[in-house]
Amino acid sequence: MLQLKNCLLIKKWSLSLSLTHTHTHTHTHTQTNLFPLSLFGFSLLIICCSCLSLNQKDKKRNRKARSSKSPRSELMPGGVNSPVRAFKSVGGQPIVIDSVKGSHMWDIDGNEYIDYVGSWGPAIIGHADDEVLKALAERMKKGTSFGAPCLLENVLAEMVISAVPSIEMVRFVNSGTEACMGVLRLARAFTGRQKIIKFEGCYHGHADPFLVKAGSGVATLGLPDSPGVPKAATYDTLTSPYNDIQTVTSLFEEHKGEIAAIILEPVVGNSGFITPTVDFLNASARSQKGNDTLLIFDEVMTGFRLSYGGVQEYFGITPDLTTLGKIIGGGLPVGAYGGRREIMEMVAPAGPMYQAGTLSGNPLAMTAGIHTLKRLKQAGNYEYLDKITSELINGILEAGKNAGHAICGGYISGMFGFFFTEGPVYNFDDAKKCDTAKFAKFYRGMLEEGVYFAPSQFEAGFTSLAHSSEDIQRTIAAADKVLRQL
């Protein structure tokens, strides 16, 4: 068993482990009859096979990825529609997916993978859930988009409001970026102030005001910000290291009466998996109240994942406003922002703050979201996610330590991450100290073993209700094998 140091925070999320027992993994090999070989010839064959690099294996695995059916860079920038998918930080040819089901995915070559990306979070009940697909098929018979109200919006809104402590009213949009854009405009409209505080390594979408020391793909590519963002767009964006309340306090003192809101990922997933200290979250809430500033939790990633009520239910800290996405659309494009009624009534047409969207509240996303949340509300689901994710991350960390690597990591419920560094990792500066070259080798090795993690050291991973104990044990065995080869 793994012995975990310090307090409850360390138990589930923290990042240093003291190991007192080593597991032994048994590997099953399939034998194939070969033509008779001389001892020299057989030895030469073994040497040649062992010298096959991960990159060469990668090319073999993705032979169809270079065909005319594959995404191509002459058609789309980098051949992808979101930068991290290009494998730029891990090297090799991106895999091209043909189908998904449950916890598994298949590429266009027919290779099967255990998936820990889950479409970057939405697939918490598993890919292509039968009940969700059936509901969508029935709904599509009535149309895919109305551009007008439908009763499904009421149903999902009631489910979100009943689940998330901070939300008394909600507005549906089409993405997490839209949700963060809307909530920022709302915070400024409600307070009459312009400045915001965001945290280094936290990602709130690709809107101009947020692309300052951002995480996700920006961190993956090593960009301090993005070209094309005017200085004026970020003039009112103040930044602080994550888990650093002293800097936040200093910013409030320096800009007294000017700050509209603090926005943060209450558990970071976009510069790797980084957890807050409870003192940091509590102090952020106190600072916000003492300065008449709004506290915004960006729960696009964590909402309905760490608990049914998100991080705010998990920690018992209620913000003024919350952004959501991913899971509430059940795998279809969606976003939402919500909060106290007095604030949300500023949003048009109830109030003067304008925000609109052609496909907002579309019946397909509402349908998928409703059926996903119904499933999540069933008893025992979050306990199951906690159990399998604990087994997964502890198994990987133990394998890494046994193989002599500096590695740390943690989890909460169905969200996890690990870094190739001694740790602990409390903020983005700590995360940047990790060995990204080693992660890239590990990543390619795991891909060859049929395990699909996020193709960046600076992204969290996800488990789902569809992941089985066999999936977890196969992943740990693969990690043990790859880590010993690094």
Image (tube, grey):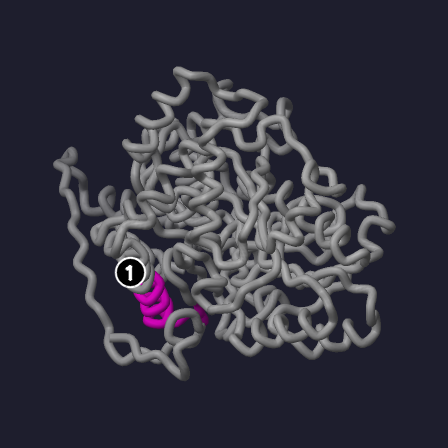
Q: Secondary structure at mark 1?
A: helix
Q: Is residue 261 found inside the magenta-colored segment of the image?
A: no
Where residue 347 sits in the image (x, y, percent)?
68, 43
User: In this orientation, which residue lies closer to the viewer: 409 or 309?
Assistant: 309
Please give left or right for residue 93 compared with residue 126 in the image: right
Kind of residue at badge 1:
Glu
Establish if 327 lies above or below 196.
above
Where residue 182 sits in the image (x, y, percent)?
68, 44
Please give left or right for residue 362 compared with residue 19 in the image: right
User: In this orientation, which residue lies closer to the viewer: 406 or 106?
Assistant: 106
Residue 397 falls in which quadrant of the image? Answer: bottom left
- Residue under label 1: 383
Residue in view at x 42 percent, y 53 percent: 305
Residue in view at x 41 percent, y 82 percent: 7
Q: Is residue 398 found inside the magenta-colored segment of the image?
A: yes
Establish if 425 lies above or below 363.
below
Name the residue furthest bottom.
6
Residue 266 falls in which quadrant of the image? Answer: bottom right
Residue in view at x 26 percent, y 54 percent: 379
Whether residue 48 is visible here, answered yes or no, is: no
Task: Please provide the residue range marked out in magenta.
Answer: 392-409
Name the residue furthest right.
232
